[in-house]
Image (spheres, grey):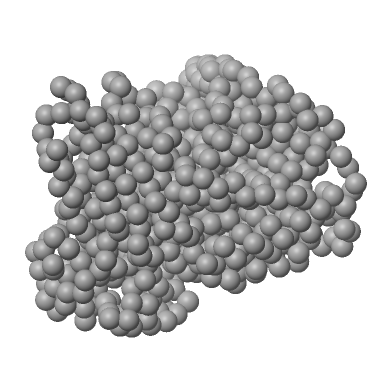
Amino acid sequence: MKFIKNFFQLFVFGLTIYISFNSLQPSIVQNTSVEHFSIKNALNHVNKIAKQPHFTGTKAHANVRNYLISELENLGLKAHIQQDFSTTHNNGLSIAIPENIIAKIEGEDPDEPALVLMSHYDSAVHSAIGAADAASGVAAILEAVRAFKQTGTTPKQDVIILFTDTEEIGLNGANLFVGKHPWAKNVGLVVNFEARGTSGPSSMILEVNGGNKNLIQHFANAQANNPFANSLMYSVYKLLPNDTDSTIFRENANVPSMFFAFIDKHFYYHTQLDTVENLDLASLNQQGEYALSMLNYFSSTSLKNLHTEEDHVYFNFPFLGIIHFSSKLILLLIFLCLSSTLVFNYIAIQQHKITLRSLFKSFTYALFCIVLAFGLGFLGWKTIAYFYPEHQLILQGFPYNAKSIILAFSLLTSGLFLYFFKFFSLKVNAISLLSVGIYLWVLISIFALIYLPGASYLIIPALFGALILAALVLFKFNNQVFHFILSIPLIFIVLPFVYFFPVGLGIASIFISCVLLILILLLLSPLLYNFRLLQGLNFLLISAGVFFLLKAHLYADFTKNQPRPSSLNYLYNADQNQSYWVSYDAFLSNWNAPYFKQPTNNLNSLDLESKYSSRFKHFSKADPISIPTSAYQIKLLEKTESSKHYLFQLKPTTDVNRIEVFFNKVQNVSNIKVNNEAVEMKKHSSSTKKYLKFFTYHVSNKETLDVEFTVDNQTDFAFEIIESSFNLHEHKQLQVEKRPVDEMPMPFVINDATIVTYTIQINE
């Protein structure tokens, strides 16, 4: 009978854990009403947009643009193109010619600040299909607008539909809209749709200057179906090497944003596998539900008073939606939790239930488990990375078998904790161990309050732990059901981060999940003291962990469905009339290895821009093929005793995709104009900014670029130019074979390109 009771407890506990994860997953609820979001219609848009790579400047990009204009007109909207040069800052200047697609639903009061529904329609350079990033966002907006217009509702304020261009290469489209479009002068809120993977729940993240109280209150009031949002995610988001179009609105126009993004299956991000087939329809549906609910709500809500200085922490909870409260309360909650735990400990000592010695023993055990978990996660991943070096080829930091690795480490951590708990629980009681767990969570909350404010709401599980402690000490109430009910907030609020941390930060951060699991188990420890199946459970968990390690091993190899990222470029040095094959690969594949039969000296002085600072690792001499360069002209416009002012004109003569311009040595640069438009520098301690890399020009339609600039009049200098064209496989003289089916172009780097470098010496 006791076995059945304990087994039932285990079943309920496991079911609760399953629900805590499953409740976050998006789902599709079929509704055929024309006023509801249709996943079928949205998927049709994605299919039309994500047929092939459509990065800025390509024919496919133009085809997508024409399709979107046609669809907006089918919705009864008048669409127009905003096209001009736009300059942003991204490791030097990033210059592009975006072609934004813009339309408007006229509101009752044009003086009211407008609502902007935004996503970008360009795919990542150069091989990404872009079904999730961000055809899903564009499709969600199109279908949400269709459903909204079916209601016949006239919005309170104008609703602007903005499909930005060149988001992937420098946020230039958003920068162009904010800086030059007249509609941008009266925008109250931006709702932006993004993706960093192809599946999973879409998280709402705020981009706001000042406080977020009003925004999160409105989001909660909008009552989106199954919302996923917490203030911790934005704090973590800022740690990642990512900005979105929303960042431009916040920084340049002080306009707040809500942006929605799903991040699971991160290994598909910016690759040729970001396809319709790999896009989770439930994630697409959730984006659409968000778009429609935000449109329905904000179309009747004034956007005049969104700015505030008060911050709220917030999180979602099943059946309750968004819970939020002032961050000012956090310090009070921390004090309440800490002081009550100290009082309960004092009473327990007076009652001879615990001693300072037992508290010290509990702390020693907790510290031992934390160190063990950290070592398991950190050294365990290092070991896997050593034996499976192919993981480093996946620059997203999230290998194909990552889910199995996360499960394996989570199960092993839990199993080891229970194994040692079996012995340690004989030496200290639940009051002592729970108290130590609460103290540790208080320390984490204090740290979060200082360094990661969005995470400071994690004091809440510790407060529920303090309630359990009160029951044990004050009322001698040791009831499993009671303990379990008070542990539910811990399971639903914190446990999902065991999975989401390595998804968002990369599998190398698995040690954070392992340590977090120990901290969770410490708060759950009162449940474990009366649980009689510990020995069997820890064996089961460890065995399951080993099983998933074996599964990770079996799925570690590259296959047709899990292709290996590889890179190859042809580089021609025009100054020396020498050519090379170059690759970013840590180790070569069967496909690109034949091109590296004549290894040569490291040419890694080349500083081609890449998202994760990757550098060339392999070099081999190649037969020289002359690659034409852009035409250029340099004029000295003005010379003083202290400075020289130049005009540098670049005129592309081929189908080059990007031109990177470096100074041969660090220069003080000021008075910059791009095509006669002054470029404001980022804030700096002086009026000039020191540069080595000057700018990257992302070419469209062979447009001529004029750049004026001033440098010190002390030394001569030179420009080092790198021109890249993504035409390696189409180049008739090179005859590069296509990759086998188990390989794909490596993302985030210059790839499948012919590259020419040359120097322009400036002596006047």
When the figure is inspected, residue 212 is found, relative to residue 103, above or below; the finding is above
When the figure is inspected, residue 56 is found, relative to residue 706, above or below; the finding is below
Front-most of residues 715 and 139? 715
Residue 26 visible from this viewpoint: no
Residue 149 visible from this viewpoint: yes
Q: In which quarter of the image is the C terminus?
A: top left
Residue at screen point 76% across, 36% down = 158
- Image location of residue 165, percent across then percent down: 54, 51
User: Is 419 displayed left or right of 69 in the figure?
Assistant: left
- Image location of residue 562, percent across then percent down: 44, 73
Q: Quadrant of residue 676?
A: top left
- Image location of residue 697, percent across then percent down: 37, 50
Q: In which quarter of the image is residue 220?
A: top right
Residue at screen point 56% across, 51% down = 99
User: Is 9 displayed left or right of 414 in the figure?
Assistant: right
Front-most of residues 45 and 79? 79
When the figure is inspected, residue 171 is found, relative to residue 221, above or below; the finding is below
Front-most of residues 272 and 168? 168
User: Is 433 displayed left or right of 187 in the figure?
Assistant: left
Q: Report how many numbered discs are placed on residues in the image.
A: 0
Q: Quadrant of the N terminus?
A: bottom right
User: Is 343 displayed left or right of 440 in the figure?
Assistant: right
Residue at screen point 32% across, 67% down = 753
Residue at screen point 53% across, 40% down = 176
- Image location of residue 90, percent across then percent down: 37, 42
